[in-house]
Amino acid sequence: MSDALIVLKNIGKRYTRGKQQVRIFDHLDMAIPRQDFVAMMGPSGSGKTTLLNLLGGIDKPSEGEIAFEGKRMDDLSEGKLAAFRAANVGFVFQFYNLMPMLTAAQNVELPLLLTKLGPKARRERVQTALTIVNLADRARHKPSELSGGQQQRVAIARAIVSDPKLLLCDEPTGDLDRETADEILGMLQTLNRDLGKTIVMVTHDPEAARFAKRTLHLDKGHFVEKDLNA
Amino acid sequence: MTFLQLIRKNLFRKKLRTALTIFAIFIAFLIFGVLATFQNGMNAGVDLAGADRLIVTNKINFTQPMPIAYVSRVAAVPGIARVAHASWFGGYYQEPKNFLVSFAIDPASYLDIYSEYVVAPAQREAFLRDRGGVLVGKVVADTYGFKVGDRIPLKSSIWRQKNGSDTWDFTVSGIVTPREARVDTNFVMFHYEYFKETRDVGGDTIGWMIVKTANTKDNERIIKTIDTQFANSPFETETKTEQAFNKAFIEQMGDLGFIILAVVGSAFVTILLIVGNTMMLTVRERTNEIAVLKTIGFTGERIFALIIGESLLLAVIGGLLGVGLAWLISFGMAQAMSSFGPMTFSLNTALTSFVLIATLGVLTGFVPAYRAMKLDVVTALGRK
């Protein structure tokens, strides 16, 4: 547990939908070690995305504690949580969520606008990130000029450009064909193996989950760990 | 990329919509600039009116005469530094459509009081010496090409000479230039003595008096003293400060200030609604993108600044284009509408425009920016 990047203790999470209170988690505990690559699976409504939101600091638990590198983050203000996300977390979404009016390079540069890096250092970082995802030659292309797989690679470059420790991927291959999906998953595997990124990936696809080191199955707010390679 | 570039790219992502919105703002500021220039021209007389100058007219109205004997009686009132008088001629050059603001004056005192009219010393001397001389304002001289020494016939739509002619011949003694651009020089003036001796009716009467007071603090007392002095006489007087007189004169046409305010106000309320609605729509369309920006670490305050920046940039582009064109048009107005007064695009108009641009930008962006700032990422991304 001491080498855990992020630890969740006794987490409870409730939402109010209309007049109903919906309980997602109750007394949930979890630890994600550094450089782990976790696939999270489970039926719809099992709490996968909510858990991803909590890990990424875009949602707060109703009860319990979340610590990132030993520091509590569940009690941070909105502003400090935003700074936390900018420094420590990269997000990859199912539908890429790129800004259509910006080029690939400008999309990748967005998180760096929140840093103190100068224009030259930012350009170098963007170039590096795009090279890692094999898209350096598409830097000036807009999202509409790129394929789905290329757009997702731009999204991955945007997620890693500020060198975060944690990557959170929500169905990153859900909108891609098998071949492209495998290419993206291979890239995530490389980021985990070679660059030491800790990755938590939500997926419905068992084939995608095979790229992770381990898979957690969530059901009604509880999960079981299952080693697919065992 | 900088934040300003990000704002610019956001603004121009839907080019047609942005162009139409900018055009609407452009039109509003063009209307404002042109009307403000017109109002400046109309108000120049009021703004430039000397605080130490009073106008004495017949109480019935200012077209009615009063005896010239009043001049010396007014001059005797304590606290008065100088008195001049003038009489309306109602002149035109060659044809009635070439209307000229023209009046007969008591030359020396009139020129002493109106120090904003600049006449070269030699020309002034020539005018004072020549009873048949006329001083021509620069605007009139430029319009008709009058030069010093020219003989010009002026016709009157009111008066006749004793010989039955409606035309007086004058020699241009000098050209009156303005001490500052806002001073109106659209007039001609000549000797009262020459006018009085040659006209068929009117006798020893004048149109109005201009009184220069030694101390403005005495204005109220002097006004009262003058009007009391002539109360219950056949020619009762009404004395006002020059500013009040000029203002009342302009308002004969209606409350120009209110009319302009109403037109400009309507234009701006419409623009506020159009731009505000466009910004609301724009931000609503981008809910998902705003949520993504927040997810990757943009704070609510930064999102607020981005959207306010966008509405400000929109207002600045449209506003400056409109104000810029109005400024260019003001030069044309100064030429074409000189008879209404000196049309100038003043510094005050420019500053007011900048304040309006900033207000428009902030007001139209505030609500969508606030909503974006408060946007719940989880809800916006449908991530529950």
Image (cartoon, rainbow, N blue to C red):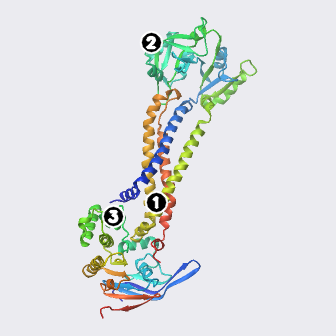
Marks 1 and 2 share the same chain: yes
Distance Cα–Cα, label 1 vs label 2: 66 Å
Q: Which residue is mark 2?
A: B150
Distance Cα–Cα, label 2 vs label 3: 75 Å
- Callout 3: residue from which chain? A
Q: In the image, B233: left or right of B309?
A: right
The quadrant the C terminus of chain A occupies is bottom left
Q: Is residue A58 above or below residue A2?
A: above
The x, y position of residue A171, in whole percent, is 37, 78
What's the mark number on residue B282?
Answer: 1
User: Which amino acid does the dot numbered 3 rest on?
Assistant: Ser
Secondary structure under badge 2?
loop
User: Which amino acid does the dot numbered 2 rest on?
Assistant: Asp
Residue B222, can we see it?
no
Marks 2 and 3 share the same chain: no
Secondary structure under badge 3?
helix
Q: Residue at x 66, y 14 (%)?
A: B69
Q: Residue at x 55, y 11 (%)?
A: B167
Which label lies toward us, 2 or 3?
3
The x, y position of residue B333, in whole percent, is 47, 32
Q: Which residue is mark 3?
A: A144
- How many labels sit on residues? 3
Q: In the image, A167: left or right of B236?
A: left
Q: Residue at x 43, y 63 (%)?
A: B302
Secondary structure under badge 1?
helix
Which label lies toward us, 1 or 3?
3
The quadrant the N terminus of chain A occupies is bottom left
Q: Is residue A11 above or below residue A79?
A: below
